Image (cartoon, grey):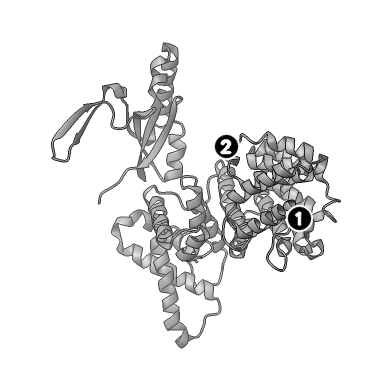
Amino acid sequence: MLAATIRVTGDIDVAEECVQEAFSKALTAWPKTGVPYKVGAWLTTVARRRAIDILRRQSTQDRLLVMVVAPQGEPTAVDGSDSIIPDDRLRLIFTCCHPSLSLETQVALTLRLLCGLTTGEVARAFLLSETTMAARLTRAKKKIKTSNIPYRVPTEADLPERVEAVLAAVHLVFTTGHTAPSGTDLMRRDLVERSLELARMLRVLLPNDAGVAGLLALIVLTDARHKTRTGPDGTLLLLSEQDRDQWDQKAIAEGTALVREALRRRPAGRFALMAAVAAVHAGAPSWEATDWSEIVALYDLLLVTWPSPVVALNRAVALGIARGPEAGLDALNQLASESQLAGYNYLASARADFLRQLGRRDEARFAYQEALGQCENEVERAFLDRRLRELNE
Amino acid sequence: MSEYLVLIYENEAQWESADGATAGKMMAAHETFGQTNAAKLRGGNALHPTSSATSLRRDSSGKLLVTDGAFAETKEALGGYYVIEAADLDEAISIAGQVPASFGGVEVRPIRVFD
């Protein structure tokens, strides 16, 4: 609805006001007239009519009036046809995730304008104060307006790159929710659900895009395990400790089919490969029976498309399981000088785990303490603490 | 249509140490850019290096201070600009992306219009 109105106004603030007015109009009109059959279409039409009124009065905005009278921009009668709305949402997400905005701003705008979160809710997702977030959103909207960031689907030539930017933003919403950077809960379900909604929406809007299929597969497959990631008392359970019977088989089937589709494009994209790793885990009957060599091979491919130290870290961990803790430790030690991993608690905790398996208790203890010093999620901290106490016994 | 200023920031030391052939190639690249985008160009100039710059600012008592050099000392300095006309930021980026700037990059800024 907001998306459809922005197309008329070309201005996010004005559109937000129009939508709000449509809601208040509904509150006065509906008790008298009854609730219309197509609620969304009714509201959208009212908001867009209001937008057109405003634009007609703003003579300086001739350029935008042209947009309104253009056949494709003119809202038709309340015929309940929703066909224009998906396009509008696609336009809006490309505006929100424009590369001239910082990734954090892209995510904030997407949560605010596409997921309909309030400014306060967006602020909480970023662990920022509402005032700070409100200022950031205002600055972003101002930049969209002054720089004239377009409100449309990019040209064919730009599309692959721009879709990548959108996927990166949605992926960030998911990872922030999947393991909350700090706080008392391991996950932020609300953010995971928003990311799933966004990925599903993109799938509808861009059904032939392999990257979209890959990201949706990754979210669906990873989230299929969410019920088993913590025990009844909220403690962290490792993949090896989780009750696989409780994994969501319907989600796994959906995700696996999506991975196959996503991998058909060559070279395979970043999200498709990450989803393939998740699919190997999801399809394995147990931790021991997991095809770890396959996982190492997938990380090798991923390192080619997406050379990141975090991917190298995951590869090292998988290698340590496939070929033993000594091999894993060697691979981890090669990453010790990566500045991007400095202070990243998963490097220290992975080292600690291999050292523990090798019986090098003092070094393991030191590494667990290092990881504890870098970790701010309470559930993860409790897990590291438990490991450390076991070593001391 | 909006107007954008494309600011060219390049490493001056590299420009200075470039031989005649390299400099010639760069100039030719700018000419090609100008011809290809003639319909969108509203202006543009190259600047003398920052060593030729004079900065002016007023101190707290309002007295004008004249100093040698650029306003901000940076490795990559403003060396030239184009004023372009574009439908939106995407078009501006596609034009600015063709501006030759082997020793640095360009910054795109929307030009403010006062009603």
Q: Is residue A118 visible?
A: yes
Instruction: Name the subunit of mark 2.
Output: A
Give coordinates of residue A348: x percent, y percent: 65, 44
- Mark on residue A339? 2
Q: Are marks 1 and 2 on the same chain?
A: yes
What residue type is disc 1 on? Leu
Give coordinates of residue A252: x percent, y percent: 77, 59
Number of callouts: 2
> From this viewpoint, which residue is outermost toward the front?
A393
A281 w.r.t. A28: above or below: above
The local crowd at label 1, few if under 14, some if 14 to 19, many if 20 or more residues have their Cα within 10 Å, is some
* Residue at 71% from the left image edge and 53% from the top image edge: A387
Q: Of residues A237 and A52, which is closer to you in this image?
A: A237
What residue type is disc 2 on? Ser
Q: Quadrant of residue A190?
A: bottom right
Q: Of residues A211 and A107, which is closer to you in this image?
A: A107
Query: Along the horizontal axis of the image, is A139 left or right of A316?
Result: left
Give coordinates of residue A21: x percent, y percent: 40, 73
Task: Read off the residue under disc 1.
Answer: A239
Q: Are marks 1 and 2 in contact (CB under 8 Å)?
A: no
Q: Quadrant of the C terminus of chain A?
A: bottom right
The local crowd at label 2, few if under 14, some if 14 to 19, many if 20 or more residues have their Cα within 10 Å, is few
- Mark on residue A25? none
